[in-house]
């Protein structure tokens, strides 16, 4: 039952599609993070299926490109773009660490966040439209959303959280709850890794071009890892905003690699 609860918590928190079952248990937060690859799979399948459907129905090229650039943000309720903007605003301020952390949690929208979002959206559109014009393998779109969430989820589970992060509560909760009935970080990590291995194996099995899939795989993983590592160093720890920052950068790197595959 706790695994079902964790899955629907992931769905309700990280996917904008209506959640069929509304459940919440603060002791299952690790499992919530552990199911991120599955939510990535759902989003990726929808993204890729809509791409194939639009092309099959003969939609105009620019319309297809716009929808493909819009969907990755919309299907997660723009949550990860919000994290990207918050981190960009804090990091680009170039102020002392304490001020950067304060800016990260500031509810106001800063100039750096707006500028960063504009250029990221333009880059998404430019590369996804180019990739669409050249033709894309269905499975490579799917694996992009799976991998970006998997790497960011592992970073959240394994990294030291910021003092203002909700994941500080996760650490404190896991020290107090009954391990026989509640989830732990270890369970979340194992759950996430098992899904990642299964989905990656299926992606290579379904791929038309193994080399292209491997390149996209590497671009997403490296893009997410590098951006998260950089943001952690700049902001002094891990948080949900930094996870979103990594997901946006990782997906962009995967989309950019599609152009060269």
Image (cartoon, grey):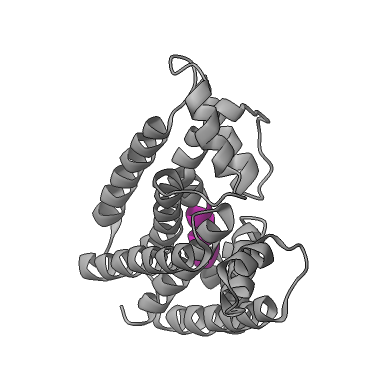
Find residue 83 and report its horizontal and vertical position in percent: 61, 62
Residue 150 horizontal side relative to residue 203, left or right = right
Find residue 109 and report its horizontal and vertical position in percent: 75, 71
- Magenta stretch contains residue 49: yes
Can the viewer see residue 70 in this picture?
no
Residue 179 horizontal side relative to residue 96, left or right = left
Find residue 107 and report its horizontal and vertical position in percent: 76, 62
In the picture, residue 223 is in which quadrant?
A: bottom left
Judging depth in this view, the residue of 38 and 79 nearest the camera is: 79
Find residue 183 and report its horizontal and vertical position in percent: 47, 26
Judging depth in this view, the residue of 83 and 164 nearest the camera is: 164
**Main SS, magenta residues:** helix
The C terminus appears in which quarter of the rendering?
bottom left
Asked if residue 234 is positioned above or below residue 33 in the image, the reply reads below
Judging depth in this view, the residue of 42 and 146 nearest the camera is: 146
Residue at 71% in and 81% down: 111
Residue at the right extreme of this rendering? 108
Residue at 43% in and 69% down: 230
Asked if residue 201 is positioned above or below residue 227 in the image, the reply reads above
Asked if residue 127 is positioned above or below residue 108 in the image, the reply reads below
Residue at the left extreme of this rendering? 211
- Magenta stretch contains residue 27: no
Looking at the rendering, the stretch of residues picked out in magenta corresponds to 43-52
Q: How many marks?
A: 0
Asked if residue 101 is positioned above or below residue 36 in the image, the reply reads below
Residue at 48% in and 45% down: 36
Can the viewer see residue 251 in this picture?
yes
């Amino acid at each position: 039952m706790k695994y079902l609860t964790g899955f629907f918590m992931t769905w309700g928190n990280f996917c904008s599609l209506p959640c069929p079952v509304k459940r919440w248990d603060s002791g299952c937060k690790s499992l919530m993070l552990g199911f991120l690859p599955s939510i990535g799979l759902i989003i990726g399948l929808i993204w890729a299926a809509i791409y194939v459907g639009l092309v099959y129905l003969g939609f105009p090229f620019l319309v297809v490109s716009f929808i493909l650039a819009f969907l990755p943000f919309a299907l997660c309720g723009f949550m990860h773009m919000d994290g990207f903007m918050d981190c960009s605003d804090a990091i680009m301020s170039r102020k002392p660490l304490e001020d950067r952390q304060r800016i990260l949690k500031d509810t106001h929208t800063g100039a750096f966040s707006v500028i960063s979002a504009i250029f990221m959206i333009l880059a998404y559109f430019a590369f996804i439209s180019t990739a669409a014009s050249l033709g894309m393998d269905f499975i490579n779109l799917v694996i992009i959303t799976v991998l970006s969430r998997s790497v960011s989820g592992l970073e959240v589970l394994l990294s030291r959280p910021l003092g203002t992060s909700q994941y500080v509560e996760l650490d404190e909760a896991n020290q107090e709850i009954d391990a026989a009935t509640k989830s732990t970080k270890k369970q979340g990590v194992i759950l996430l890794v098992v899904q990642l291995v299964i989905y990656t194996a299926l992606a290579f099995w379904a791929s038309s071009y193994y080399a292209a899939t491997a390149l996209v795989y590497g671009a997403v993983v490296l893009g997410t890892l590098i951006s998260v590592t950089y943001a952690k160093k700049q902001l002094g720890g891990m948080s949900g905003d930094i996870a979103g920052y990594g997901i946006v950068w990782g997906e962009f790197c995967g989309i950019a690699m599609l152009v060269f595959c």
